[in-house]
């Protein structure tokens, strides 16, 4: 994670039934994965520790979850509009992957896109360093 100051970002799905807030820097690293699910959805996500993410209002009632394979990843999406604005990734089960395109405009200043080879998950996991993105820096 960046040592940059944390900002409070708000975001959610297309129909706005799912709303959340996340603490993250204004400059984020988003991951473009080529696994079967991510490549079909076209989601590019940045990862934060779970304690930096909070669902707002009655959002939970509009969320449904899809899992496959190891069932570690919890692919959440809005029951109304179908948008995946966040999910619990297999890569970072202690974190939340947030679609940077679902963050309300005005707080993200820069997005660096990195590729993740999800078709070769195990070798990419060890070489990418992605696991560190869901860890809070030691205080």
Image: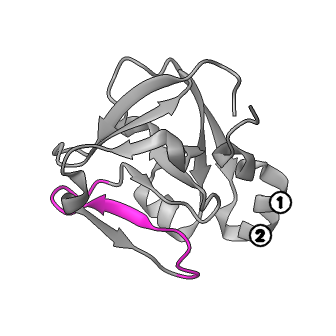
Magenta segment, principal secondary structure? loop
Residue stretch in magenta: 69-83
Identify the element where label 1 is drawn: helix
Which x, y percent locates residue 38? 50, 60
Query: Foreground residue, 29 or 135?
Result: 135
Residue drawn at x 53%, y 21% is: 26
Instruction: Look at the numbered discs 1 and 2 and tell me whether their residues touch, using CB distance below 8 Å.
Output: yes
- Could you give the CA–CA distance between mark 1 and mark 2, rounded to whole angstroms? 7 Å
Tell me: residue 88, above or below residue 107: below
Check residue 86 for magenta coloring: no
Q: Is residue 9 left or right of residue 136?
A: left
Q: How many marks?
A: 2
Residue drawn at x 52%, y 68% is: 73
Q: Which residue is mark 2?
A: 122
Which x, y percent locates residue 74? 46, 68
Q: Which residue is mark 1?
A: 126
Query: Foreground residue, 138 or 108?
Result: 138
Identify the element where label 2 is drawn: helix
């Amino acid at each position: 994670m960046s040592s940059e100051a944390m900002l409070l970002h708000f975001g959610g799905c297309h129909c706005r039934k799912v709303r959340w807030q996340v603490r993250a820097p204004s400059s984020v690293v988003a991951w473009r994965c080529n696994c079967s699910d991510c490549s079909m959805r076209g989601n590019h996500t940045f990862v934060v520790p779970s304690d930096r993410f909070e669902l707002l209002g009655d959002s939970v009632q509009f969320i449904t979850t899809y899992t496959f394979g190891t069932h570690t990843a919890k692919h959440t999406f809005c029951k109304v509009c179908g948008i995946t604005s966040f999910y619990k990734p297999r890569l970072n089960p202690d974190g939340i992957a947030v679609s940077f395109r679902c963050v309300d405009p005005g707080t993200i200043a820069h997005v660096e896109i990195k590729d993740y080879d999800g078709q070769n998950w195990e070798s990419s996991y060890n070489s990418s360093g992605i696991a560190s993105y869901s860890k809070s820096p030691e205080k």
